[in-house]
Amino acid sequence: MTYSVRVVQDYISQYAPRWAGPGNEGVRDLSGSCPGCSRLELRVQRTRSCCREDRPLPPAPGAQPFPNPTQPCPVPAANPGVTMNPAVFLSLPDLRCSLLLLVTWVFTPVTTEITSLDTENIDDILNNADVALVNFYADWCRFSQMLHPIFEEASNVIKEEYPNENQVVFARVDCDQHSDIAQRYRISKYPTLKLFRNGMMMKREYRGQRSVKALADYIRQQKSDPVQELHDLAEITTLDRSKRNIIGYFEQKDSENYRVFERVANILHDDCAFLSAFGAVSKPERYSGDNIIYKPPGHSAPDMVYLGSMTNFDGTYNWIQDKCVPLVREITFENGEELTEEGLPFLILFHMKEDTESLEIFQNEVARQLISEKGTINFLHADCDKFRHPLLHIQKTPADCPVIAIDSFRHMYVFGDFRDVLIPGKLKQFVFDLHSGKLHREFHHGPDPTDIAPGQPVQDVASSPPESSFQKLAPSEYRYTLLRDRDEL
């Protein structure tokens, strides 16, 4: 038999005070006066209570005896047609605790267990899960301890919406017990929440609010359809051309081509907008069969067509990722923590939002001069108005933009005049000077001797380069336990 929360509240408010004695305020005061050990979650009140057999409580003055537990309990006036099933409990010295046990047993909803991952089961569980959210934690970490009950409650909420065990999995890894797994996924802080799709770890981990609602909303978003279906090709003319759009044209939805496309969209939907058309709607675009089109931002750049096998996941994924994740990415306060945690120095163009010409020049020169440096440095652009503080660190203001600088996470170094970026090899040398240590040496000791004209005296010029500004966007020690040394794992 199931009772509503309102019925339970009426029941407790009507009968608990009589058993507790005058002056008590129902179950909340009862639970507070029970100083034992074994905790019982009373979800109706969201309070904690505890009972212990070997520590009886003194009887409250004027308390009435507890009703016979073998008899049906009286029902509150809110629903007089219902009687509760009889229940028999082991005797406890303080009968008031029996009420807490009774209500907890009858009204506590079934909870789900968080799946504990180890080296034996991790691949099997993650590979068979449509979506898995994994909590990498350490028992001694206070932030991990705070997250545990929230993570469990979010799992309960989502399990009601997605009851199939492979639809959504909430799992956890004890990084102290399984340091090999922590190293495998490059865990550098506790707790870290990583998302997996069919065993593939997503690049972006969860960095949002640690609340039941926020976690549940995040999973709902991940389970939503990442592909928008077009019902008329005229809808393409209304696309947001400030975004990167990937459009798939398919003969039918129930096909291997579309399943691969949808799988890629699930992974990259944060970076691109994915759209699809089927059957008669897509026929004008399927003159050579199913195909995928990339529409870059803006109206001047031409469309690009995928020429590889559409049933080859790796080939399709790599092509779409190359289009969706640009070589020069925008840094914002929302993704700053993620970019900083990648650990690569920043080469940043600060520009006004409306100054697309400078951004295009920077993008072209990065692609021309620095494509080989991808993986050793992050190429970024930032809004001058939003990032005034880093500009002040290098003694610049938005009026000075566009400005190019490197943030090494120790110091910031300014590129000189922006137009010098058009000099062949100039931007590349700036990055090489960072890697060689020349930028740091020259800030502290002046130009290298090789940069001084013959016969000119060498003079040691002491200077202090500005400290890193973007390092402040890194994961905060007020939110995570940071592992300074990966050997800790």
Image (cartoon, rainbow, N blue to C red):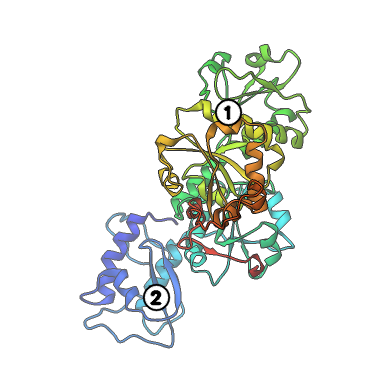
Residue at 37%, 72% in the rendered image: 99
- Per the rendering, the mark at residue 98 is 2
x then y, percent, for residue 414: 53, 44
Residue at 41%, 46% in the rendered image: 392
- Per the rendering, the mark at residue 361 is 1
Mark 2 element type:
helix
**Which mark sits nearer the N-terminus, 1 or 2?**
2
Q: Where does the N terminus fall, quadrant-wise?
A: bottom left
- Measured along the vertical axis of the image, is residue 393 above or below residue 270? below
- Measured along the vertical axis of the image, is residue 402 above or below residue 339? above
Which of these two is toward me, 401 or 375?
401
What's the amino acid at mark 1?
Ile
What's the amino acid at mark 2?
Ser
Q: What's the distance in space between the residues labelled 1 and 2, CA to CA?
A: 75 Å
x then y, percent, for residue 363: 60, 31
Crowding at mark 1 (Cα within 10 Å: few <14, some 14-19, many 20+): some
Looking at the rendered image, the disc whose residue lies closer to the viewer, 1 or 2, is 1
- Position of 182 compared to 298: left or right? right
- Per the rendering, the mark at residue 246 is none
Mark 1 element type:
helix
- Measured along the vertical axis of the image, is residue 322 above or below residue 178? above
x then y, percent, for residue 421: 59, 33
x then y, percent, for residue 396: 43, 42
